[in-house]
Image (cartoon, grey):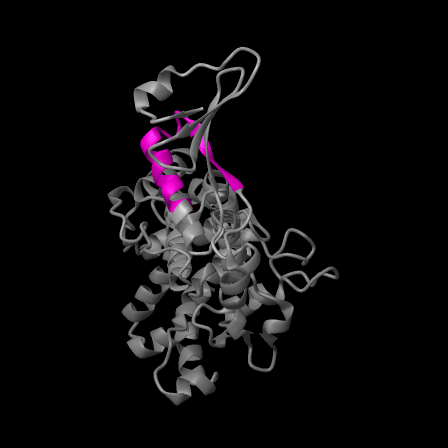
């Protein structure tokens, strides 16, 4: 059956009893509408590919489904059919092109992009790649996994962050935004997506508030006393944070092999230090006494551990809540101990440059790269002066 199809005519068409109806569009040769016995309608196009037959003639007649009506209306069906016929006229099989496009779409789903991003970028270059991988798996892939990355819109990013923010809070939402934007940047550099539609999203509710909290000496003493009541492993950890002014990760991850007995110090390998440079930390008398009193586990090398030394101590949130209760000091973080120690060392007259060395901030020039014992005496003097207040 042939007919010059119109939108109204397509709407009104009904199946013939006991058989399937097929109506060819006289306006565009090759386009046809099929109507099943149950009334379901779908579009298809028939074509012959130029140069695919014997002697360079057109090939055998082929059919390609375009989609269901009314999801695809008459206008859209004609556009799709015209594009397919144009491909056939140029010697390309539209079915092959569709297959390639589908394969490309499958390759460019967020699931597949994320897998390549983790394997090719995060694992080789990011120390804590497990954290980023976990956040993507927990919060991003369940929402976007099967979606081609090019189909993600800015509004999708905002909705995702809204959902994470409401369910898990500001901290997790910030981290998700950071890692999603980084993944999209990586995909853009590889031409997997034309533009990073998530870059530069304005989210005042996720803005970082710069912390300037410095605990007074009275507050530090209260925290010091509370640490003593907590016992191992968090008590020694908190006291070492105060005494050494190092980051939580470096103290919590302290290993037996890092100790330098002849130097009365410990050495954090570059692979475990934020600046990717080895940091030697002298131990003042009270710090050395704490380290020497830590258990020597048979099962592993971590000095602060709840798993027999096999893994470093964790569960900081609960420990911090207990310190708050015992010390009555509120509105501070474990990282504030580092800032507070540095501030009070400066108050004691210790040279700012030497405080910077204690903190492990990068030193400019060749010496900063190769001489891990640079300013060791000055660092020891600074930490001894500070440690004398905590005997």
Picture quadrant where residue 189 is located: bottom left
Q: Residue at x 31, y 23 (%)?
A: 7
Picture quadrant where residue 80 is located: top left
Q: Range of the magenta residues? A: 62-84
Q: Which residue is more in the foreground, 19 or 134? A: 19
Q: Which residue is more in the foreground, 67 or 183? A: 67
Q: Residue at x 44, y 40 (%)?
A: 325
Q: Residue at x 39, y 25 (%)?
A: 70
Q: Is residue 20 above or below residue 67?
A: above
Q: Which residue is more in the foreground, 192 or 313? A: 192
Residue 171 position within the rendered picture, expressed as x and y whole percent measured from the top left: 39, 45
Image check: 212 left or right of 22?
A: left
Residue 101 position within the rendered picture, expressed as x and y whole percent measured from the top left: 47, 50
Residue 290 position within the rendered picture, expressed as x and y whole percent measured from the top left: 56, 63
Q: Which residue is more in the foreground, 205 or 370? A: 205
Q: Is residue 100 above or below residue 63?
A: below
Quarter of the image with the N terminus in it: top left
Is residue 265 visible to the viewer in this orientation of the structure?
yes
Q: Residue at x 30, y 65 (%)?
A: 343
């Amino acid at each position: 059956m042939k007919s010059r199809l119109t939108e109204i005519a397509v709407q009104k068409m009904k199946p013939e009893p006991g058989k399937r109806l097929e109506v060819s569009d006289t306006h565009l040769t090759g386009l046809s509408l099929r109507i099943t016995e149950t009334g379901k309608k779908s579009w298809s196009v028939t074509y012959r590919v130029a140069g695919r037959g014997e002697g360079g003639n057109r090939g055998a007649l082929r059919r390609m489904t375009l989609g269901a009506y009314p999801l695809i209306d008459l206008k859209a069906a004609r556009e799709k059919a015209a594009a397919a016929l144009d491909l056939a006229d140029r010697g390309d099989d539209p079915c092959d092109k569709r297959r390639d496009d589908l394969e490309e779409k499958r390759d460019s789903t967020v699931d597949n992009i994320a897998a390549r991003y983790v394997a090719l970028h995060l694992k080789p270059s990011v120390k804590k790649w497990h954290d980023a991988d976990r956040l993507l798996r927990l919060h991003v892939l369940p929402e976007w996994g099967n979606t081609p990355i090019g189909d993600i819109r800015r509004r999708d990013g905002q909705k995702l962050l809204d959902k994470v923010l409401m369910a898990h809070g500001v901290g997790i939402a910030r981290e998700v935004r950071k890692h999603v934007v980084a993944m999209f940047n990586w995909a853009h550099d590889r031409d997997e997506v034309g533009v990073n539609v998530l870059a530069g999203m304005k989210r005042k509710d996720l803005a970082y508030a710069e912390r300037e909290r410095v605990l007074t000496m009275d507050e530090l003493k209260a925290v010091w006393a509370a640490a003593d009541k907590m016992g191992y492993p968090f008590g020694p950890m908190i006291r070492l944070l105060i005494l050494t002014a190092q980051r939580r990760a470096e103290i919590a991850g302290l290993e037996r092999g890092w100790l330098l007995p002849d130097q009365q110090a410990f050495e954090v390998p570059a692979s475990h230090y934020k600046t990717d440079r080895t940091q030697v930390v002298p131990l003042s008398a009270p710090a050395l006494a704490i380290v020497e009193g830590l258990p020597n586990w048979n099962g592993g090398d971590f000095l602060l551990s709840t798993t027999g030394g096999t893994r470093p101590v964790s569960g900081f949130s609960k420990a911090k809540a207990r310190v708050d209760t015992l010390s009555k000091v509120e509105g501070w973080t474990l990282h504030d101990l580092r800032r507070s120690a540095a501030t009070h060392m400066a108050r004691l007259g210790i040279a700012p440059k030497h405080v910077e060395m204690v903190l492990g901030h990068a030193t400019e020039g060749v010496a900063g790269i190769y001489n891990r014992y640079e300013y060791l005496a000055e660092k020891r003097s600074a930490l001894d002066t500070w440690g004398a207040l905590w005997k």
